[in-house]
Image (cartoon, rainbow, N blue to C red):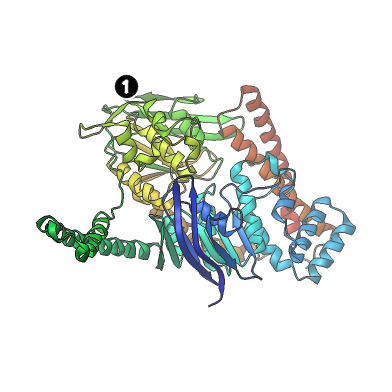
Amino acid sequence: MISYLQAENLTKSYGEQALFENISFGINKDEKIALIAKNGTGKTSLLNIITGKDTPDSGNVSKKSDISIGYLEQNPPVDDQKTVLEQVFASSNQIIETIKNYEKALASANEEAMQEAIDLMDFYKAWDYELQVKQILTQLKIDDLNQIVGQLSGGQKKRIAMANLLINEPDLLILDEPTNHLDLEMIEWLEKYMQKTKSTLLMVTHDRYFLDRVCTQIIEIDNNTVFFYKGNYTHFLEKREERINIHNLNVVKAQNLMRKELEWINRMPQARGTKAKYRVDNFQVLKEKAAGKMTDQRIEMEIQTRRLGKKILELYGISKSFGDLKIVEDFSYKFSRNEKIGIVGNNGSGKSTFLNIITENLEPDAGRIEKGETVVYGYYKQTGIKIDDNKKVIEVIKDIAESITLGNGKVLSALQFLEYFLFDAKMHYSLVSKLSGGERRRLYLMTVLMQNPNFLILDEPTNDLDIMTLNVLEDYLLSFSGCLIIVSHDRFFMDKVVDNLFVFEGNANIRNYPSNYSDYYQLKKEKEKELKILEKEAKPEKEKPEKEKARKLTFKEKQEFDALEKELHLLENEKKSLEDALSSGTLSTPEIVEKSKRISELLEIIDQKEMRWLELSEI
């Protein structure tokens, strides 16, 4: 087996907090490895050390000299001055440079530059590679290659960085939370891509289906130590449980031996001389072992829920549009107690608008909303909240309440409540600025739940949370007695928690599926398969008319055809950007009118160009 990378005796601390101590591991060619650990235990720090962006306190990392490494950070650095094309194809690879020049020539409609680019594409046999590149860009919904990177959102920038990484096909791919900011369709494509890629893989992710289907080995950091598991996520769970049970058996043995040693020391004080010193020393060792029982810290979130009356939330004929763009149309629904609804749909399909309507942050154009008098919303937003970095963790909680009442009538102090959420005593007085991204999310989740809601809305709650916290959150949500709405791209999380889906299909079409995500996905795939079979059966009849004269596109027609494809991508991308803006609920009335007018214009232009594209495609 070819060794790509060796990490030896790595140690890293921040102040008094030790992240890991003297850990060693290797990465071999063709392995697909996941790194699992609790938030704040140094996953990202370890990736930064491996890629040379940070240095360990001690230890070293050695790499095979001739391998290429690609690193996708959680917030990857990009050049805001570049175009998407320049950022996506930022590489010295000759084939990629050739494809980039071809794309530029295509956009410029310069016949001479086009011919030169085509000749180079032929010379480097880059056409198949270009198709692969276009597939990556299409799946990651990167259409407008001429847009300036600085105009994009954080999620779009991450997708561009990922596209650049996949296009370059490095020998070793290192990915930090690659599924964040991807919708379900993209995640499923990326999962299949990673199963087939020839690149060796090291990644951090909380997506458990991704882990189960892609990874062949798991490295766990626990209590500053590293543990190795061959196999996928399911195998990891089984072997980790075995490890903890064996450890705890040894602790029990140590406790029994310590009890005997304690009896001996107490019974024979005169024997504590030089000859018996080893027994006293052994007693101290046993004492340490006996105190080392391992448990998975669980957040027993039996938070008291406010009483929820018979009438909860009822929607009657709700409609919402921005100009010609319909988001919701004539939608009615009555929410029930204990109902757990998942919302899925592509970006811009209206999910955020819907949440803003039901939480009364946005007025519908038509219909009415009747909310029960006892309903109290708890809204966990994807954007989070601004927490003062200069505050201590305990201060953030005490600003909301000094104590919290649980469902069993037990009252917890703010300190005890923090411990429920895995913030141990040494972290209570840490500054918020010292927290990792996942620890901030956990703190934000606490601020939502401790306000005792009975109608809980969670918008992408799984981002940046570790798997241990997710397990606990799932347990709480399963026992939550109020109403629950979740928007999430985490398929495992949705399958485990929700029992009903609102599927936002776009164009104001919202379908209600009384099932979890996997059932819906299977049904969707079966329908798509049936549709393809029907289309295939119907196709010969459509093609029966005799072809008058078989001919190929002229050079100018091919140039026009390629340019039309490019223009349609740009126009669709502009339309999608406008739709996203209209769905955000942040625009002023004049801005809404202006953008709606532009969408109407775009629809006409797109129709005209699609007609011409179809004419050329039939030649």
In this rendering, does residue 574 appear at all? yes
Asked if residue 336 lies left or right of residue 561, the reply is left
The image quadrant that residue 281 belongs to is: bottom left
Picture coordinates of residue 334 (x, y %)? 35, 33
Q: Residue at x 59, y 30 (%)?
A: 322
Asked if residue 544 lies left or right of residue 552, the reply is left
Picture coordinates of residue 479 (x, y %)? 27, 42
Asked if residue 269 lies left or right of residue 284, the reply is left
State the quadrant of the C terminus: bottom right
Secondary element at tag 1:
loop
The furthest residue to the right: 112
> Which residue in the structure is indicated by mark 1?
373
Q: Residue at x 20, y 66 (%)?
A: 275
Which of the two residues, 331 or 228, is positioned nearer the viewer here?
Answer: 228
In this rendering, does residue 333 appear at all? no
Picture coordinates of residue 76 (x, y %)? 61, 49
Picture coordinates of residue 362 (x, y %)? 50, 25
The furthest residue to the left: 267
Which of the two residues, 407 or 56, is positioned nearer the viewer here?
Answer: 56
Asked if residue 222 lies left or right of residue 295, the reply is right
- Three-letter amino acid code at disc 1? Glu
The image quadrant that residue 601 belongs to is: top right
